[in-house]
Image (cartoon, rainbow, N blue to C red):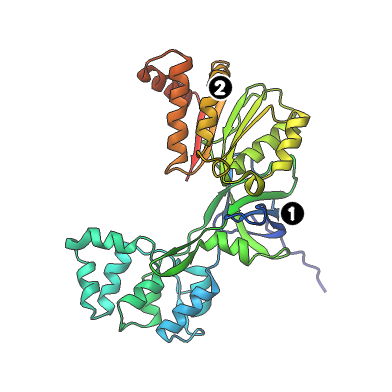
Amino acid sequence: MQNTIANKVPTTFSRTNPFPAKVLKNQNLNGAGSKKETRHIELSLKGSDLSYVPGDCLGIYPQNDPELVASLLEEMKWDPETAVTISKQGETLPLREALTTHFEITLLTKKMIQQAAEFTDNEELKQLSSEDHINELKEYINGRDLLDLLRDFGPWKASAQEIVSLLRKMPPRLYSIASSLSANPEEVHLTIGAVRYSAHGRERKGVCSVQCAERLPEGETLPVFIQVNKHFNLPDSPEKDIIMVGPGTGIAPFRSFIQERSVTEATGKSWLFFGDQHSATDFLYQDEFEAYLKEGGLTRLDTAFSRDSEQKVYVQHKMLENSKELFAWLENGAYFYVCGDKQNMAKDVHSALIDVIEKEGKMTRENAEAYLSAMQEQGRYQRDVY
């Protein structure tokens, strides 16, 4: 009998072929009584051959909430085991599984609503999807999902297949990596805030964040891939100083930065601005950062807890309080990083930074803006905002 050795083709894990990473740890970072729930998740990359550098992101393919899927099936009286086609190649899945793992069901698009209008005699939907009512349509889409659409505009003359044909494929969610590979070989850590809110008479949940908070026990696996982030990196030289502004979950990449600089014994100074609601319950990674401060892995730590005083204090206020020293660091070639909320925080930090440069550099507003633009061109002002 002839012995044949199968040629083992090495598997490359990527966005199109995610790695099933095992959950090693999943804990809530917030204390009892906090209005927030922030999960610290540690995943194993053992056997994946995946690597990353501080600043990179982890992509996760999430699953929809089983309760939401059950409500859809019930609303439409669909058989969960009906096979539906999910791709142009003709691949099929049972309906429940397709709605859970394959399709985006929590967001609506203009195109989807216009196509859905063909499957109902509902005049209101026909009107809403017409080009004359574009603003009302935008307003309707905001904060609503597939279940709202199906409940609001029935009765439907469409099969399950026709409805799922309107849906987009579930996109991966990207999160800033909160660990350094040098400090945690074969592991990747994340800092994820669970998104929960009420809108249009229903409780809503972030697809990925609430899966991580509620349905991701240790030992479970999560399909992941590394997304390189070329625009958010540590300086090439370990001698350069860094200033990091990361309130809330914006702290994630800076935990990675500090771990990396500590392990590699970088000689540059580091200054972290962190903020959240309450010091007692929302000071994420407090013990770690205070230990780095003692050991010298972190030079300065300034915190702003907005609900701990009558006047709300945010990270930008702490920057202004320390404007003289902040500008001295910039003049000395420090790199400035911001991570977090694009809507408000990043704008306020940007504006405060220009204030600091204008005041301490004794410049006009215009010159202060030009100074910051020059920093940006040199890669010394980097933002990772969402």
Callout 2: SS: helix
Q: Foreground: 296 or 377?
A: 296
Total number of numbered discs in the rendering: 2
**Where is residue 361 drawn, in percent x and y?**
47, 14
- Residue with the mark numbered 1: 46
Q: Is residue 9 above or below residue 296?
A: below
Q: Badge 1, how many Cα within 10 Å: few under 14, some, many 20+?
A: few
Q: Which amino acid does label 1 sit on?
A: Lys
Q: Name the residue under label 2.
A: 326
Marker disc for residue 77: none
Between 14 and 82, the residue placed more toward the observer is: 82
- Which kind of residue does numbered mark 2 sit on? Leu
Q: Which residue lies furthest to the left in this view?
A: 132
Q: Residue at x 81, y 68 (%)?
A: 3
Question: What residue appears at the point 23 percent right and 68 percent down from the top-left corner?
Answer: 128
Measured in 3D between alpha carbons, the distance from the residue under mark 2 to the one under mark 1, in whole angstroms, is 41 Å
